[in-house]
Amino acid sequence: MVEVVTGVADYRASEAWDGKPIATIGNARTMVLWADRPFHWHENSTDELFVVLNGRVDMQYRDATGEHRVWMETGDMMVIRQGESHVAHPEGEVRLLIVAHPADKED
């Protein structure tokens, strides 16, 4: 069955980093998140595709070579693997599409 999701560009949650589930596709879950303030450093229990739907995000992450930062613009994507340490700092309001695999784990 085809599912059409509308209102994504204007979606606003009652709290920063809240979201709404969109669909489970195979063994991945998708959701739209809204944020207007930084999250906190954390490591996911799943692999995650992080897509900026609108806005701008200062994404910081740590790996074996140290701490890094990349500015993500509308349309940019980042894959964050299970256990990788990261934090997102939105510049104003942002809407994000998150695809997490596997779907049966939640962060």
Image (cartoon, grey):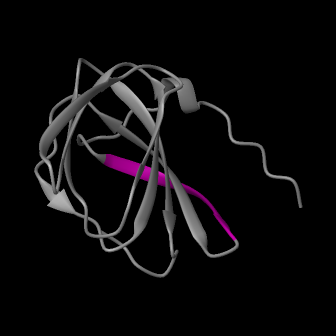
In the image, taking residue 62 as reference, residue 104 lies left or right, namely right
Give the answer, above or below, for where 71 lies relative to 17: above
Placement of the N terminus among the 4 image quadrants: bottom right
Which residue corresponds to the image point at 17% horizontal and 37% vertical from the top-left?
Answer: 68
Give the answer, above or below, for where 2 lies relative to 70: below
Instruction: Name the main secondary structure of what is drawn in magenta.
Output: strand
Q: Quadrant of residue 55?
A: top left
Count of numbered labels shown in the rendering: 0
Which residue corresponds to the image point at 49% horizontal and 28% vertical from the top-left?
Answer: 76
Residue 66 in percent (x, y) is at 10, 47
Residue 52 in percent (x, y) is at 45, 31
Which residue corresponds to the image point at 23% horizontal and 19% vertical from the top-left?
Answer: 91
In the image, taking residue 61 as reference, residue 100 lies left or right, namely right
In the image, taking residue 104 as reference, residue 43 lies left or right, namely left
Which of 24/88 is in front?
88
Q: Is residue 97 magenta?
A: no
Placement of the C terminus among the 4 image quadrants: bottom left
Chain part drawn in magenta: 18-25
Q: Is residue 24 magenta?
A: yes
Which of 36/7 is in front?
36
